[in-house]
Image (cartoon, rainbow, N blue to C red):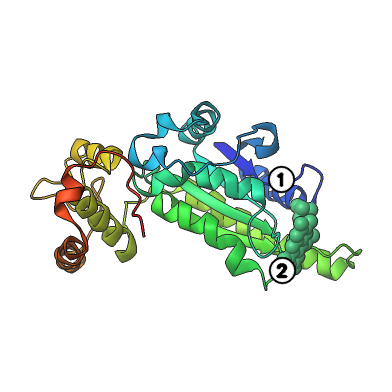
């Protein structure tokens, strides 16, 4: 089994220690080939906010070569680990910069069904805000979130009881990820994911000349066909589909009310309103 661990942390710190323990537990369960991808070894300049990836195409990002290298590794792996310690109640800067560069996947997801596990070295007070950005990307980019685990590591020597508690937590986590990787599951998007599909599909229809890359993507996946329910075939209940379709119509009306259609029709660039 090929696993890629994307590490937004230093190489000799607590997060690395946690992921290495997690790896050893997984290896005790069966054949695992885990590659560590330290983001510090793959320097990507800061996202400059040009929006090219979102509106025109990811290949128009000034840092595309570096980003593509990592994305290709993700695509060729069976499972992904995303790891970051908690710094200032968030992910590290290097992890956030990576997430900014792959954020366009939230508009045009491609990692359907790929299993991902989130790991952090942080306290319980940081858990929600550290996992927040990683979880947002994971969910919108199409991954299946297998689980997430944080371990609090004080910079003081723990006694055996405390160390064993942390090991036990990671043993359980590794077993969960391992079992999930072994299972072939049907795609079952949650309501939020279904609504996001409908929202972006409508936005592109309203402004195909501005949201060019998204519109192209939605057309390619035949999202405007009558029977289309989601990006790819998935189990979606009749109720969820009807509700999301209702919300889409409602939203289309609301957004159309906000727009100057004449200006919209003449525009082909990323648009910025002037106040
Ligand atoms: C720049 C920086 C910011 C941090 N911010 C927080 C914080 O906001 N809250 C907290 O409880 N710990 C904070 N910490 C402590 C780390 O979360 C903790 O030491 C973690 O285990 C570090 O993991 P690492 O060794 O993989 O870098 C911070 C540490 C650093 C270096």
Residue 142 visible at all = no
Residue at point 40%, 44% (across, down)? 105
Residue at point 16%, 41% (across, down)? 222
The local secondary structure at tag 2 comes to loop
The local secondary structure at tag 1 comes to helix
**Is label 2 within 8 A of ligand 1 (CB to nearest ligand atom)?**
yes
Which mark is on residue 275? Answer: none
Give the left or right position of residue 72, taking residue 253 as reference.
right
Q: Position of residue 168 (x, y in %)?
A: 71, 63
Q: Nearer the viewer, residue 60 or 174?
A: 60
Q: Tell me, yes or no, whether the two marked residues, 1 and 2, touch with CB atoms within 8 Å.
A: no
Residue at point 77%, 42% (across, down)? 11
Q: Position of residue 75 (x, y in %)?
A: 46, 34
Give the left or right position of residue 130, taking residue 40 as reference.
left
Q: Which residue is mark 1?
A: 24
Q: In which quadrant of the rendered image does the N terminus lie?
A: top right
Give the left or right position of residue 100, taking residue 215 as reference.
right
Instruction: Classify the position of ligand 1 by quadrant: top left, top right, bottom left or bottom right.
Output: bottom right
Q: Nearer the viewer, residue 247 or 227?
A: 247
Classify 10 Å Cα crowding around label 2: few (below 14), some (14-19), many (20 and above): some
Look at the picture and state if 81 lies above or below 255: above
Q: Which residue is mark 2?
A: 123
Q: Position of residue 195 (x, y in %)?
A: 27, 61
Would you identify the image quadrant in which residue 197 lies? Answer: bottom left
């Amino acid at each position: 089994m090929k696993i890629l661990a994307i590490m937004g942390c230093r190489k000799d710190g607590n997060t690395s220690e946690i992921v290495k323990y997690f790896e050893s537990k997984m290896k005790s369960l069966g054949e695992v080939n885990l590659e560590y991808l330290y983001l510090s070894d793959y320097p990507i300049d800061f996202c400059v906010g040009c929006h090219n990836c979102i509106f025109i195409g990811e290949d128009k990002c000034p840092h595309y070569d570096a980003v593509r290298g990592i994305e290709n590794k993700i695509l060729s792996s069976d499972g992904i680990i995303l790891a970051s310690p908690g710094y200032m109640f968030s992910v590290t800067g290097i992890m956030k910069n990576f997430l900014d560069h792959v954020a366009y996947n939230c508009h045009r997801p491609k990692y359907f069904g790929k299993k991902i596990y989130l790991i952090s070295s942080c306290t319980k007070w940081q858990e929600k805000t550290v996992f927040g950005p990683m979880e947002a990307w994971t969910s919108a980019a199409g991954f299946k979130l297998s689980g997430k685990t944080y371990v609090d590591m004080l910079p003081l020597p723990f006694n055996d009881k405390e160390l064993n508690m942390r090991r036990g937590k990671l043993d359980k986590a590794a077993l969960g990820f391992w079992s999930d990787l072994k299972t072939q599951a049907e795609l079952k998007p949650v309501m939020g994911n279904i609504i996001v599909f409908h929202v972006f599909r409508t936005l592109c229809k309203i402004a195909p000349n501005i949201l060019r890359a998204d519109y192209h993507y939605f057309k390619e996946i035949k999202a405007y066909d009558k029977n289309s329910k989601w990006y790819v075939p998935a189990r979606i209940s009749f109720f969820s589909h009807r509700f999301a379709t209702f919300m889409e119509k409602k939203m289309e009306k609301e957004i159309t009310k906000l727009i100057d259609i004449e200006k919209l029709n003449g525009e082909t660039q990323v648009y910025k309103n002037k106040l």
